[in-house]
Amino acid sequence: MLRVSVIATVKNERDSIQELLDSLALQSRPPDEVIVTDGGSTDGTLERLRAERRLPLRVIEAPGANISQGRNRAIAAARGEIIAVTDAGVRLHPHWLAHLLRPFEERPETMVAAGFFLPDPRTPFEVAMAATVLPELREIRPDRFWPSSRSIAFRKAAWEAVGGYPEWLDYCEDLVFDFALYERFGPFAFVPEAVVYFRPRPTMRAFFLQYYRYARGDGKADLWRLRHAIRYGTYLGLIPTLAGLSLGVHPLFALGYLLGGWLYLRVPYRRLSRLWQGYPWPDRIRMALWVPLIRAWGDLAKMCGYPVGVWWRWRHRRGLHRPRGFTGLQPRGTGYASARR
């Protein structure tokens, strides 16, 4: 039987770590070990981890470690041949690990298995947030799916072959790691049944910070240039141009806003129509009004964060290195499932 190590990194996750531990303890296929790297918690997270008695849990204390460093420390210490990665802030389906291991058991040549995640909103605002930023399974192309490290498994040998998670990146490190694995080993086994439930950010402030950091990571890693260029072109070029044309040439040019708004919001509203089931109509109206605000706020956060990352990259360009096997090519596709697209 395959030996599997579940790893995660945490820092100041006192309010969410118990839910992760509880769902790990309820797995139908228990992990052979659980290794958690703590990056310097000061809020009682370590105490909760040390009090856990249901799991074969080891805690590595690494104050100051970023997410990549924390994951690499945990994986290096793992004894399992299969590494399953998850994160604080999620709860796992009871069969998460069993599903995630299935490709390795059925096809010994499997090197990477990609799980999926679903929104776990607790408030009407979080429902609107989930509809705006989290993809549905029907939107995913399995052959071009870049999993978040909330739900992924790989052979420890694969991690070693690509040099681990990129420690020079503090955000979007999992995407760069995905690219390295893909270039070395080809498409991943997609296991949509291996579900983790992820709670969207509960406030606009937390959401702005999240997307700012993600975009800063894009700039550092030199990712998605075209996407960011289109965003800047839309907000700084197209929208003002349409305003000028509608005021100075003909009011019909204002119809461009209606077309653009429909293209921009049709997918979030389609998701929302499924997520808001069971909520009263006043809440549904509030959710519908939140969607365009969340979308624009996230774009603003990206536009603020991306140049900061590019500037960082320019200043550190001589010292950058990437995981072995990563050439810098970005595989095509839109299936990157995370709370950031």
Image (spheres, rainbow, N blue to C red):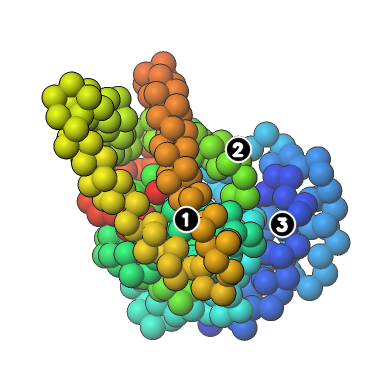
**Residue found 67% across the figure and 71% down from its top:** 24
Q: Which residue is mark 2?
A: 205
The mark closer to the camera, 1 or 3, is 1
Residue located farthest toward the front when viewing the structure as drawn: 251
Q: Residues within 10 Å of mark 1 (few under 14, many from 20)?
A: many
Q: Is residue 107 visible?
A: yes
Secondary structure under the numbered disc 1 in the rendered image: helix
Comparing labels 1 and 2, the label whose residue is closer to the camera: 1
Spot occupied by residue 200 in the image (x, y as percentages of width and height)? 57, 54
**Which x, y percent locates residue 237?**
24, 25
Residue 113, placed above or below residue 297: below
Q: Residue at x 49, y 68 (%)?
A: 275
Can you give x and y, in whole percent of width and height, for residue 4 in the image? 56, 70
The answer for how far apart the CA atoms under marks 1 and 3 are is 28 Å
| Dot 3: element | helix
Numbered disc in front, either 3 or 2: 2
